[in-house]
């Protein structure tokens, strides 16, 4: 959809951003596909702004001190009061970019950071004011964690409290971004409900990611997010998290994290039931990732050992398709609880 006064360059950049999201996150791509304008483009661009620092933070080939410097440079480029340009960040990150033929979708977004930030600069002022602060908080939080574990060359989360702190920076800030875009144009009571429960929505989704991606996080990024205190209680040191001999013990910790994540389900549902369908926002866009998380938690609690033995856990495409298809038919807020219960029991396409 083209709005009056939209320039061709902006339309081309927005189209590129929407295409880029399809490559970096299947779940977020589903969300954005369920949104209408202008929310679809706001969330798309805001998410890509977050994906740049997330990729830098996960980059095992970049020394920690250089990661921190790049993150700080990127954060400064997003500061309207700073003279640092996004082109300066792009120039400094150049030596660390994989060759074009070897770049995955994430690194392609990092390489195109000036395009993403330029597209952001063209958004409506109120959208920029809602998006910029949480993105900058995410960047500063990631820099803080990289610096904290600079000597180990990868994150080694110690406690469940520290894990929740990390989850806040990685996902809670994105929840704030979403809430900022919606809370200003709704009733005060609904806005209070949104702000009271936004953290739970973010914690749920990020804790599920932590539990299901243990092997990839360690083998590809040298990060261990499972709390070291819980691992040691199970008789495992963080460095042994993917050792097949430790699989049963690590599975107990994965199960424990999944149960901890389940504690955020009710507040997340309260958040979803309060979300206003304004500015192109839809119930489906955020309920689908919520229900996919419910399904993933079901699998994590039933077969946590597969996180190590199989390299991860995902719910099948048939179930994803069934959940997405259910919302295509139309779903009311009052039916969310029923669908959640069905997904929690068994794969949704088997109902």
Image (cartoon, rainbow, N blue to C red):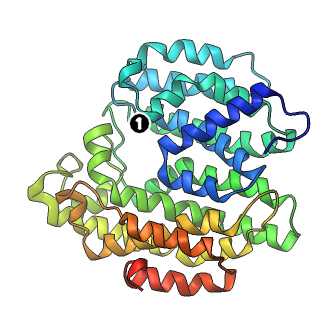
- Nearest to the observer: residue 204 or residue 37: 37
Position of residue 192 measured from the top left corner of the image (x, y, whole percent) = 79, 69
Residue marked by disc 1 = 58
Q: Residue furthest left?
A: 245
- Nearest to the observer: residue 252 or residue 92: 92
In which quadrant is the N terminus drawn?
top right
In which quadrant is the C terminus drawn?
bottom left
- The correct choice, above or below, for 256 with respect to 73 in the image is below
Report if residue 311 is visible in the image.
Answer: yes
Q: Residue at x 20, y 45 (%)?
A: 239
Q: Is residue 110 left or right of residue 260?
A: right
Q: Residue at x 73, y 58 (%)?
A: 179
Helix, strand or loop at label 1? It is helix
Q: Residue at x 54, y 71 (%)?
A: 325
- Nearest to the observer: residue 119 or residue 199: 119
- The correct choice, above or below, for 196 with respect to 137 in the image is below
Q: Is residue 121 left or right of residue 324?
A: right
Position of residue 35 measured from the top left corner of the image (x, y, whole percent) = 69, 57
- The correct choice, above or below, for 90 with respect to 255 in the image is above
């Amino acid at each position: 959809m083209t709005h009056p006064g939209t320039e061709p360059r902006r339309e081309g950049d927005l189209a590129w951003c929407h295409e880029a999201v399809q490559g970096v996150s299947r779940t977020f791509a589903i969300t954005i596909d369920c949104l209408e304008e202008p929310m679809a483009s706001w969330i798309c661009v805001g998410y890509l702004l977050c994906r740049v620092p997330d990729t830098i933070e996960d980059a095992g080939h970049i020394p920690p001190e250089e990661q921190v410097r790049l993150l700080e440079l990127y954060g400064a480029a997003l500061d309207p009061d700073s003279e640092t340009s996004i082109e300066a960040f792009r120039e400094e990150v150049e030596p660390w970019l994989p060759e074009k033929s070897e770049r995955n979708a994430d690194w392609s977004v990092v390489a195109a950071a000036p395009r993403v930030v330029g597209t952001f600069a063209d958004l409506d002022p109120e959208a920029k004011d809602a998006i910029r602060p949480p993105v900058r908080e995410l960047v500063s939080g990631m820099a803080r964690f990289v610096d904290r574990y600079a000597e180990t060359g990868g994150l080694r989360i110690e406690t469940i409290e520290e894990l929740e702190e990390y989850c806040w920076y990685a996902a809670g800030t994105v929840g704030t971004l979403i809430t900022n875009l919606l809370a200003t144009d709704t009733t005060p009571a609904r806005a209070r409900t949104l702000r009271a429960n936004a953290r739970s929505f973010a914690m749920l989704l990020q804790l599920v990611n932590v539990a299901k991606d243990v092997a990839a996080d360690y083998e590809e990024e040298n990060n261990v997010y499972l709390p070291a205190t819980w691992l040691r209680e199970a008789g495992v040191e963080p460095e042994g998290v993917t050792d097949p001999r430790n699989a049963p013990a690590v599975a107990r910790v994965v199960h424990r994290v999944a149960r901890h994540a389940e504690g955020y389900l009710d507040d997340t549902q309260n958040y979803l039931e309060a979300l206003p369908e304004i500015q192109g926002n839809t119930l489906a866009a955020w309920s689908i990732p919520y229900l996919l998380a419910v399904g993933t938690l079901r699998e994590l609690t039933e077969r946590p050992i597969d996180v190590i033995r199989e390299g991860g856990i995902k719910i099948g495409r048939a179930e994803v398709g069934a959940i997405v298809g259910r919302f295509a038919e139309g779903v009311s807020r009052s039916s969310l609880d029923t669908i959640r219960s069905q997904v929690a029991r068994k794969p949704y396409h088997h109902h």
